[in-house]
Image (cartoon, grey):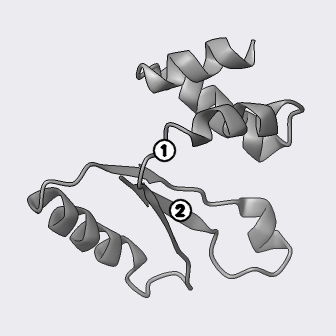
Amino acid sequence: MVHSIVKKIVNGDVRVAAKLIRDIDDGAPGTREILKGLYRHTGKAYVIGITGAPGVGKSTLVDQMIHGLRTSGKTVGVLRRSDQSLERRGHIGGPCSYATA
């Protein structure tokens, strides 16, 4: 099962990748094993986290980062997560993660 999911994601199956992201966020069992299987395919990717209060320019910063990286021939993937439950617990703004390879 893990190998099948890893293979689909590596081959570009966006739906399977989206389901994995949701399962990770939900704390579903088995996601750690899938991530371990994906790790060897990550190459030299960077993961950059951007967070901050509303209106401080996070999206503008990320847009400029993406433009610069793509202009230099890099592949960029963006995952954005705004967790309303975190905001209700006192966190200002939801966390956002941006990944580039």
Answer few, some or many: residues within 10 Å of disc 1's Cα (few below 14, many 20 plus, some between 14 and 19): few
Residue 87 located left or right of residue 18: right
Decide: is 8 above or below 56.
above
**First reached walking from the N terminus: tag 2 or tag 1:** 1
Decide: is 66 above or below 77.
below
Q: Amino acid at mark 2?
A: Ser
Q: Nearer the viewer, mark 2 or mark 1?
A: 1
Decide: is 5 above or below 60.
above
Mark 1: secondary structure: loop
Q: Which mark is residue 13?
A: none
Residue 100 placement (x, y as % from top left)? 37, 56
Residue occupying the point 52% across, 16% down: 8
Mark 2: secondary structure: strand
Q: CA distance from mark 2 to mark 1?
A: 16 Å
Residue position for label 1: 42
Residue 77 placement (x, y as % from top left)? 38, 48
Q: Quadrant of the N terminus?
A: top right
Residue occupying the point 57% across, 31% down: 18
Residue position for label 2: 97
Residue occupying the point 75% across, 41% down: 24
